[in-house]
Image: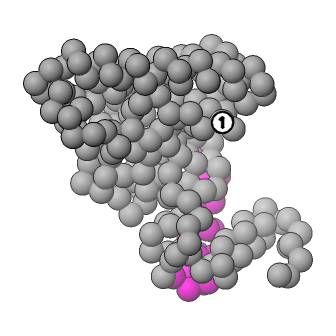
Amino acid sequence: MAEIGAGTGVAFFAPFLLMWMIEAPELCHRWIAMQKLPALEMTRRAITNGAAVVAMGGDVSCDKGPFISPQAYRAFVLPVIQEHTRVIQQAGARAVYTSDGNHWPICQEFFFDSGIDGYKEVDKAAGMTWPRLIESGVAERVCIIGNIDARYTMCQGTPDDVRREVIECLDFGCRTPGGHILHLSHSVHEDIPKENYYVLVEAYRDYFGMARLPAL
């Protein structure tokens, strides 16, 4: 898997870009276009060199919703994601968008209009829960790459808490037509006790009847 962003990570936009969206939209479009061109070329090269999946990013939402209005998202960000997705898919690879946060206010655009094949960093703590992903039809259309809580369960939970969440997540994943890959809501970061990480791996292997790894 290659990880290549094309300038759509609104969380990392400088303040002047957010001002341009309102005061000088053409300048904002030009800046985003400059960011995407090298990214699209890198994408084509990565797929030629064997990447079967390209993870696009980065963050477009926080816990409270998108960083910009749905209207601004449609005008400035969505067209680039759609173009990047087309480039990936036409080259024979799968397109995954990586962003934690609450995407429900832009559900149609983020999950359906974008054309993405997968969704990574599924943020349960921000409201991107399995029941709602299934009820909304997202889990039927998009491969869910998550949904183990890296904020609370993995950091503060007991090994039993982690084991229960892994089993629950895999139960949901086995029922969804869009597919599922077990993953944290962000990453295996430094605040996660190693014991909880080992339990996650053990629970996954037990669930599918795989041999346990040697004790560390």
Task: Give coordinates of residue 52: x percent, y percent.
Answer: 72, 30
Question: Quadrant of the image for the C terminus?
Answer: bottom right
Task: Give coordinates of residue 139: x percent, y percent.
Answer: 50, 42
Task: Give coordinates of residue 33: x percent, y percent.
Answer: 38, 17
Q: Residue drawn 89% across and 69% down?
A: 211
Quarter occupied by residue 71: top left
Q: Residue drawn 18% across and 27% down?
A: 21
Q: Say which of 167 and 120 sits in front.
A: 120
Question: Quadrant of the image for the N terminus?
Answer: top right
- Number of marks: 1
Q: Main secondary structure of the magenta part?
A: helix
**Residue named by callout 1:** 2
Given the image, on which type of amino acid does mark 1 rest?
Ala
Q: Is residue 180 above or below residue 183?
A: above
| Magenta segment boundaries in residue numbering | 157-176
Q: Is residue 83 above or below residue 55?
A: above
The way the protein has been coloured in the rendering is: one colour
Q: Residue drawn 24% across and 32% down?
A: 17
Q: Residues within 10 Å of mark 1 (few under 14, many from 20)?
A: some
Q: Residue drawn 66% across and 73% down?
A: 197
Quarter occupied by residue 214: bottom right
Q: Say which of 168 and 46 sits in front.
A: 46
Residue 161 shown in magenta: yes
**Residue sitting at the far left:** 23
Looking at the rendered structure, the secondary structure element under dot 1 is strand
The answer to whether any part of residue 205 appears in the image is yes
Report whether 122 appears left or right of 181: left
Q: Say which of 131 and 65 sits in front.
A: 65
The answer to whether any part of residue 141 appears in the image is no
Task: Give coordinates of residue 164: x percent, y percent.
Answer: 59, 75
Residue 18 shown in magenta: no
